[in-house]
Image: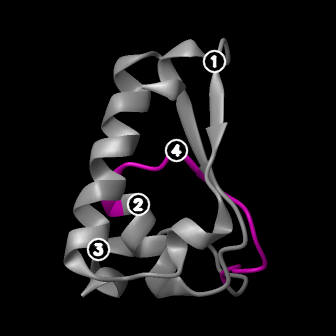
Amino acid sequence: AAIDRVPTDYIKLSPTCMDDRSIRHRDELRRLVHHAHEGGRRVIAPRIEDAQSAAMLWTVGVDFIQGNFVQHEAQNLDYDFRAAAG
């Protein structure tokens, strides 16, 4: 795979990877993230603007998200991504 030939510690997904929310697409994304992790790479997902996308990416194993999705201020940071993924 091309990913194996790139000497890097981080992989940033294309924003188009997050457009399709189908189960089949989610499984493909999970395999890609798993393959990156096997090679010692961390995965970044950009342009995350909603809780559902953040939750889905968390469930497939993405390490970092970037975007304008933020939690309202609170005493603790205990956002439940599993509940938002449903």
The quadrant of the rendering that contains the N terminus is: top left
* Badge 1 or badge 2: first in the primary sequence: 1
Foreground: disc 1 or disc 2: 1
Task: Verify whether residue 82 appears in magenta.
Answer: no
User: How far separated are the C-alphas under marks 3 and 2?
Assistant: 8 Å
The residue that appears at 40% across and 27% down in the rendered structure is 37
Disc 1 to disc 2, how far (Cα)?
24 Å
Type of residue at label 2? Answer: Trp
Distance from the alpha carbon under mark 2 to that under mark 4: 7 Å
Expressed as whole percent of the image width and height from the top left, the position of residue 21 reads: 37, 82
Query: Mark 4 — residue?
Result: 63
Q: Residue 69 in magenta? A: yes
| Corner quadrant of residue 10 | top right
User: What residue is pinned by disc 2?
Assistant: 58
The earlier-in-sequence mark between 4 and 3 is: 4
Judge from the rendering whether residue 27 lies leftward or rightward of residue 77; answer left or right. Answer: left
Which residue is label 1 attached to? 6
Q: Earlier in the sequence, mark 1 or mark 4?
A: 1
Q: Position of residue 70 (x, y in %)?
A: 71, 79
The region drawn magenta spans 59-71
Identify residue for label 3. 82
